[in-house]
Amino acid sequence: MGIKVKKHIILFNGQNTLSVFYYKAFFILLLCSVLNLNAQSISGTIYNDNKETVSRAIVTLLNPETDETVDYVLTNDKGFYILNNVKTGSYKLSVNAIGYNKIESDITITGNVKNNYNLKQEKEQKIEEVILTATKPIKIKSDTIEMNAKSFMNGTEKNVEDLLKKLPGVTVESDGKITVGGKEIEKIMVENDDFFEKGYTLLTKNMSVKPIDKVQILQNYSNNKLLKGVENSEKVAINLTLEEGAKRDWFGNADLSSAIFPESYYLEKITLTKFGKNAKYFLLGSTNTIGVDNLGDINHLIRPTMQDEPGFINVDTEAHKFGVENFIYLPFGSEKAKFNNDKLISANAIFNLNKKMKLKIMSLGSFEKSNFSKFSTIDYNLGDKQFTNTEDFYRNSKKTNYFNKLDFEYDISKKMVLKYSGNINYWKNNKNENQTLNSLPWNVDQRTDNHSIDSNVLLTNKINDRLVWLNGIRFLHQKISDNSYSDQFFFDGLFMDYVDIQNFKQASNSKIQFLGVVSQLLYRTENENLWDFSFYNHNTRQNFSNIMGFEKNSIAYFLPDDYKNNFKNNNNDFALSLKQTSSFGKFKINPQLDIHYVSNKFENELTKRKEFFYLIPTLNVSWAVHDKGKINSSLFLSRNSTSIIEMLPNNFSENPRNLVRGINNFDYLKNSGASLKYIYGNWNDRVFINLYGSYTNYQNYLTYNYKINQEYTSSDLLLLKNRNDYLFSTDLNYYLKAIRSNFKILYTIGTSQYKDQVDDSNFRNVFSSYSKIGFQLKSGWKKNINYSIGTNLNISKITTDQQKTRILNQQAFLELLFVLNEKTKIEIKNNYYSFNGYFNKDNSYNFLDFKLNYQYDKNISFSLIGNNLFNTKKFREVAITSYSTYTTEYSLFPRYIMLEVIFSL
């Protein structure tokens, strides 16, 4: 029997819209802002001996008794400064600028004060660093921006991720990915040692913030120490420095949380770390039933990729991952819909064996049990054919994941380094699904196993200060097998001769073996131009097989040959690459030419051989328009190879109601385009603007011929020509001094024009677009209250020859932090979602969470946590495709109240 969807009712009166809660919130924020505006201010202009104004001078207000920083500001281009919201009292005021003697004066505030100052030029000075405040909350030293961690903590931080969210210019996305000024970081190190590379979420989600002293943002970072000063790097990394006591002793946290009601929810986690001079350890164990993902995305560890990294070999393809799709695509992530029982254990160590050798060992095991349910209504609009399906879905899965990694680094000499990195990964995933299609019940059992080995060796030889030679080799082997069983057979319309079939089976295997070698020379000329020459050879062997069938009267039957695959593809790519970077005043030009010779052998029933010879030219130009403005432009021509699924000669079943068939060969998909980017300011300036636009033309691309029936869908891939994609995005940040808050505007729009086909009819023109606009206001008050408030609008449109579809989804959020005293703090988070309409009362949802934290002493804290206080048990969202509209309702965690105790070890 199908499930009838009832209208969702929020248990708290008046909470099905934002009105009451948000009006009160805005009133509170307005009142706080007014109180701030009524405070005193100190302003004036800074001059030098020549009566010229001094820009970017640092004006600091200090407590005269403790010398602690009360506030600070930098003078603008006209030498003007203003410090707002200053309380009545006595202070010390300090003025400092590069090249001038620092001056200090005592000052008493009883009202608004205007003071000008004259700085005397120093006769001789060595500039080591620029310090923004007397107590150094921020330092700028060459390519390093150093932040005093304690200056940005408010006591609510449980892990490194919570701290990074509070740092200016640092963004932590919902999946844990960290960006600085819009650029994803390479790694997070602790005391200059890196445990997890781009799999840093394992560290950021679990390491305590208590021992952290400084957070260093490393700009123009080089992953290879011998390339510093030679390569052109725009990479960003983060290094965490620790307090002196934490460098010698073991430290960590024990986090014990249990729900008061219902009693079945808990979280337990323990971390132990030690960062000594010769040995560093990071140990972790955790278990939880509240949907928390303590592991994060470790794909970067299993299959490391490093774009534009000299000497590193990237693998652009992989074995097919059967049945690992998430199925939970919620705007707030899967945490509120994932009913789980997860366990994780991880042991990691770095040993400095001697001055020349370093060994890093990483090992983890994760054991995940999860289930979730959803109910979907899918309205199909195929011109003359229209129908509606209702699908009830419940999944119970168990996944076991073992991962081991070893890195070894040997400094053969001061100018020659050998690095080895290797990992072994095994995981298995068992799923059981109970589903209902239009009141017809059916079940699916699926088991997937993965084995992979990945090894990489790199030898770096710095021949002299301007010339570096890198040689690398990488070997990868991966095999994934899958077996699935369904107790219903949905493809009756394709097999009229088969009668009374009651089940469906498929066994599949996907395998890849990769061997790559590279040799690369980097040479920086005396006029600072860079020449980059490399050659490489990549050999990729792929195997794929699947066979479909059913059982009847305990006898196994197999479907015809059109419903099984067994093919191999062997691809050898030999390439030469020449890249050069030249600077001409404010201009930098970077042309690149890659020359490829590819031989490919595709083996199915027949052997198909192809040879490709092609060029890939690229041109990048940058222009420093002025001190704060920069334009980057790019012209490119590229080719992308078809994936293993796209090469399928015959049908393969992604799930028991879906068939897909590829193009029965290997090919390259050509595309070309251009991009333009404008940056104004730096991410730590008062004004920061990032504008980006791109156009891509796909000379050939893959699309589908859909054959959609009420019981099943069959999709055949087709190779067509001429698809056009456009993208524009902007990120505007402005610091509002009057209310000490950062205002951010985000806007993105992307469009795509292509063709597809339905039921072998004429090709349809499809135009799809996606746009998002967001606003955010976040305070930086040094008071007992802080806030973050914002909203996002997402608009999706799809237009075909038969129909036009448009949906508008809205999100709004409000976060408040109240500091009641030094030991007690309250966090309140409210999220509002509206689907298929702006403030759509029939499909809108409110989520309210809170956390009351009490710091008993320096080692023990207690928290009372409330989750989903409005007890929203269902969540319904709307999505569209070129032929259907999906309305999906998820079951969510009920309201719970939890007591948390954290012990610092």
Image (cartoon, grey):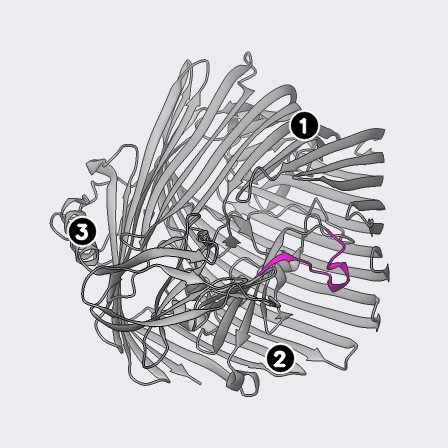
- In primary-sequence order, the first of circles 3 and 2 is 3
- From the viewer's side, name the closer residue of 238 and 161: 238
Q: Which corner quadrant of the image does residue 352 belong to? A: bottom right
Q: Tell me the crowding category of disc 3: few under 14, some 14 to 19, or many 20 or more residues within 10 angstroms, Cα based.
A: few
Q: Is residue 1 something one can see in this rendering?
A: no
Q: Amino acid at mark 1?
A: Asn
Q: Are marks 3 and 2 in contact (CB under 8 Å)?
A: no
- From the viewer's side, name the closer residue of 714 and 129: 129
Q: Which corner quadrant of the image does residue 464 belong to? A: bottom right
Q: Secondary structure at mark 3?
A: helix
Q: Secondary structure at mark 2?
A: strand
Label placed on residue 671:
1
Q: Tell me the crowding category of disc 1: few under 14, some 14 to 19, or many 20 or more residues within 10 angstroms, Cα based.
A: some
Place of residue 35 in the rendered image (x, y in percent of width and height, measured from the top left): 17, 58
Place of residue 144 in the rendered image (x, y in percent of width and height, measured from the top left): 58, 62
Q: Mark 2 sits on what residue?
A: 280
The residues bearing labels 3 and 2 have C-alpha atoms spaced at a distance of 49 Å
Q: Secondary structure at mark 1?
A: strand
Q: Amino acid at mark 3?
A: Leu
The residues bearing labels 1 and 3 have C-alpha atoms spaced at a distance of 51 Å
Residue 228 included in the magenta stretch of the image: yes
Q: Amino acid at mark 2?
A: Lys
At 70% across and 44% down in the image, what residue appears?
317
Place of residue 128 in the rendered image (x, y in percent of width and height, measured from the top left): 60, 68
